[in-house]
Image (spheres, helix red, strand yellow):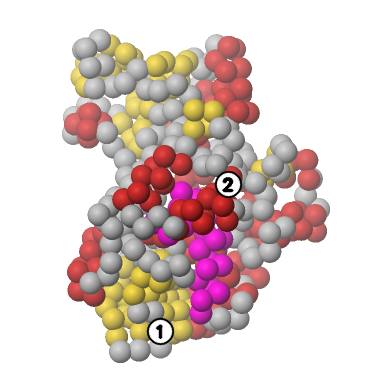
Amino acid sequence: MLDCIIVGGGIQGITLATSLLKSGKVTVDQLAIVDMNEEPLARWRQCTEVISMPYLRSPSVHHLDVKPFSLQTYVKKSGDDWNTAFYGRYKRPSLAAFMEHCEHLCDELSIKRAWVQGKVRAASKRENGWAVHLSNGEQLYGRKLFLAIGIGEQPYWPEWAVRLKQNQESTIFHIFDDQLPAFDQVKRPITIIGGGISSVHLALKLGERFPNEVTLLKRHPFRILDFDSDPAWLGPKNQYSFRNLKSYQKRREQIFEARHKGSIPPDLHMKLLNRIKQGSLRLVDGEVESTEVQNGNIMLHDKNGKIIEQTGTILLATGFLSSLPGKEWLSPVIDKYQLRCADCGYPIVSQSLQWGPDLYVTGALAELEIGPIARNISGARHAAERIVASL
């Protein structure tokens, strides 16, 4: 019998594991981190490498360790160039520095000793804890269960894209698909669909690799903001008023309004405009309603049937579905143990993020308590602090 089982080894899960271990609430030998990937943060690494994001959007105090300036301290001690490790007035860390710090943290805490690669099939309550059932038949038993699963396994496909994918002559992928081919193997020209930070990073990357063969197609004006939600959500003012909302529908509405979905920071916007001005990258406005394939080329039409773009390959940078993550195995657990959920299907939890007996959540599953920052690195830190303080 383990003390703690964490389901999910991404940003949320590793941040929680770090806090649990450093607080002394658990030892690594009494911890299991269950994830379908081979190593910690594998999905995060995959997604950031696809778009070649040079710097994170969040400031340097947002990382996986407990102390706020841990990342800055690590960079100083490692001898890395401070000027390349951080960018701008918010000291946004480079992806390289951030990942080095994550690896250092995992090594320091021997996180891999707690790693269990596997896919969760079910979970069941026991008299003194929880059993987690894996698809390979293995079972883990722990006194406390923490769910750190996110929406990263649920790429969003618009209806027109789903229909197009069924056409065997078409070439369309979501940029966060597990089976995304190498970009130099896809048919060109390439059209990227989306107007958010991932689409812009990818457009810059591919525009440099394939000049004059990449188009960024967006359906709304660029939303230019430093962060994907107001920094006031990190402090007590917004958090206090949010928690005072008794209606979970109003909490959901406030989360939706507060999240700057599909936004990009000013420096990235300027970089894109410069690249477009140089002529190596195209920008097109329009909303796709339907498609057709002619001679191996894909025609994208708007609602009036007008051709917006003609392309060889479509890459969707359309984000993720917002529906409850882990629904396939989590729904039976909700029903069996009568776990409270709001109308949107997400958990109703205590301030300590407890959902049921010895059951806690973090990340997307905690957003009706943590608010719009729940899915971010800052939200992971907030959640870990609350959970650890309650144990």
Q: Which residue is mark 1?
A: 143
Q: Are marks 2 and 1 in contact (CB under 8 Å)?
A: no
Give the magenta part as a residue range.
368-391
Image coordinates of residue 72 in percent, x first then y, are: 74, 54
Q: CA distance from mark 2 to mark 1?
A: 36 Å
Q: Secondary structure at mark 1?
A: strand
* N-term mark: 2 or 1: 1
Q: Nearer the viewer, mark 2 or mark 1?
A: 2
Image coordinates of residue 384 in percent, x first then y, are: 53, 66
Q: Is residue 87 magenta?
A: no
Image coordinates of residue 191 in percent, x first then y, are: 39, 23
Does residue 203 appear left or right of residue 69 in this picture? left
Residue flagged by tag 1: what amino acid is it? Arg
98 shown above or below 300:
below
270 shown above or below 117:
above
Q: Is residue 374 magenta?
A: yes
Q: Which mark is residue 232?
A: 2
Foreground residue among 52 and 86:
86
- The residue shown at (58%, 70%) is 19
- Among the 4 quarters of the image, the one containing residue 262: top left
Foreground residue among 312 and 123:
123
288 shown above or below 47:
above
Foreground residue among 107 and 284:
284
Q: Which mark is residue 352?
A: none
Viewer can see residue 113: no
- Among the 4 quarters of the image, the one containing residue 317: top left
Q: Quarter of the image containing the N terminus? A: bottom left
